[in-house]
Amino acid sequence: MSRETIIVVEDEQIVASDLKMCLEGLGYRVPAILATGEEVGERIEEIRPDLVLMDIMLAGAMDGIAAAEAIRGRFGIPVIYITAHADPATIERAKITEPFGFILKPFDERALQTTLTMALYKTRMDRRIRESERKYRILIEQSRDGIVILDQDGKVFEANRRFAGMLGCSPEEVSRLHVWDWDTQFPKEQIIEMIRGVDEAGDHFETRHRRKDGSWFDVEISSNAAVFSDQKLIFCVCRDITERKQAEEKLRRTTLELKQYISELEQWAHVASHDMQEPVRQMVSFAQLLERRYAGKIDSDADEYARFVYEGAMRMQALIHDMRQYYHLLTEKKPFEKVALSLILKKVIGELNGPIQESGARILCPGLPEIDGNPKHLGLLFFHLLDNALKFRGEEPPTIRITCKRRSPGWLFSMKDNGIGIESIFTDQVFKVFKKLHPRDRYPGSGIGLPICRKVVENHGGRIWIRSRPGKGTTIFFFLQEFYD
């Protein structure tokens, strides 16, 4: 049974007592019986009843109508008048307070119950509606996007402050606007046609809006139709995408500039890796010819100069060779195929047979898997890693251990040597192009070998890294992704 709270305001004690008994018999709580309008003003905030049963004619300076007006204005608590005065003037005056009903004395219990039930039901419904409206208003006003609701003629039905701010207008100014006041990209007739064509499925598009000051901004709109009180309205969520559009335009320009830069770089790399080979080859040939014909016939300085020319030409030739390899890694896009890495390693060991024999190196590898990849590029990977392990050796003959473990979604490889090692602060720098940590006369090379290795690994969906300590050798790890099962 309902336990709503009702206050009785009645200055006739007998009537008040009868009302209290009747109300409690109907299941209501009656925490107080008040006799004057002044008491109502003092106690109403403390009790906060669900309803007030109010006599119109009360003792004191304030009658029931004045007390009801105060209650309605401050608390919104519903009032039902119970009175013996039903003259038209009194009724008209009481109507101003928007009461939930009138009950004439002497009251009928059934009429009282019906009036109370309907009044409390209406109060609950009103509260739900107000709460729903409050939540709706919070959602609308707290939105980070502009929200505008339009009628079928393109006039603003409602808009939040965010939308008004986007247009540089006050909410009052926006309420007087039509769509074509801020969207002038289409004729008025076409805009109305577009609005009337929006359905519940909605639409999503980008356009431009004009602010009050005449400036423009890009906007993304999501719209859909809904029916309120038999009126079809268009609900639009507007997001300012000016910054995004500017970023996209900047990215587009940067991409074009980058493409042009890459094109120029590819042309330069082509020239460097092809057209420069012939003059360098001639330098090597003529330096060798000078050494064979005139060694010891002029003086020791001439012999040294010829050697300098020859060594410089050979370094240039090696550099161009490595640059060609790096250039092909950047530009060659061949589909992957099944590659037996054991065969790749065997071929690389054959290519490095001279340095292996010279250093007395041992290469230990229990076996390597078959993976998907580019065989030529994987050959470069193992060639440069082994070449470095042989080149940067210590006093003892090199021992190079190659291992491989399955690590989903690919394979984790390691190549460990007993060479000179490097400081940990340099383990990232050695993968930069032309970065060399040692003098050229002691450890010759172009500085492109490890960058080539990194590019090969990245092209195979993996990464490469180093762990090393000076004098304790180096272990290079690299992960290659398995693209197909």
Image: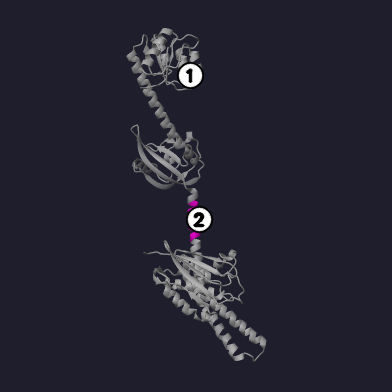
Q: Which mark is residue 257?
A: none
Which stretch appears magenta?
Answer: 245-255
Q: Quadrant of the N terminus?
A: top left
Q: Main secondary structure of the magenta part?
A: helix
- Residue shown at 41%/7% (left/top)? 14
Query: Residue 365's spot in the image, x, y percent?
Result: 46, 73
The reply to whether residue 272 is visible in this rendering is no
Q: Secondary structure at mark 2?
A: helix
Q: Tell me residue 189's x, y (percent).
A: 37, 42
265 in relation to 305, above or below: above
**Mark linked to residue 44:** 1
Query: Which quadrant would residue 398 be assigned to in this image?
Result: bottom right
- Provide residue 253's location: percent of width, then percent of height: 50, 58
Q: Name the spot of residue 236 as percent of width and height, x first.
A: 41, 41
- 373 inside magenta stretch: no
Q: Is residue 39 depicted above or below 346 in this figure?
A: above
| Near-viewer residue (200 or 107) | 107
Residue with the mark numbered 2: 250
Pick whichever, 102 or 166, lies toward us. 102
Q: Residue at x 48, y 72 (%)?
A: 382
The amino acid at mark 1 is Ile
Would you say residue 246 sits in the magenta stretch? yes
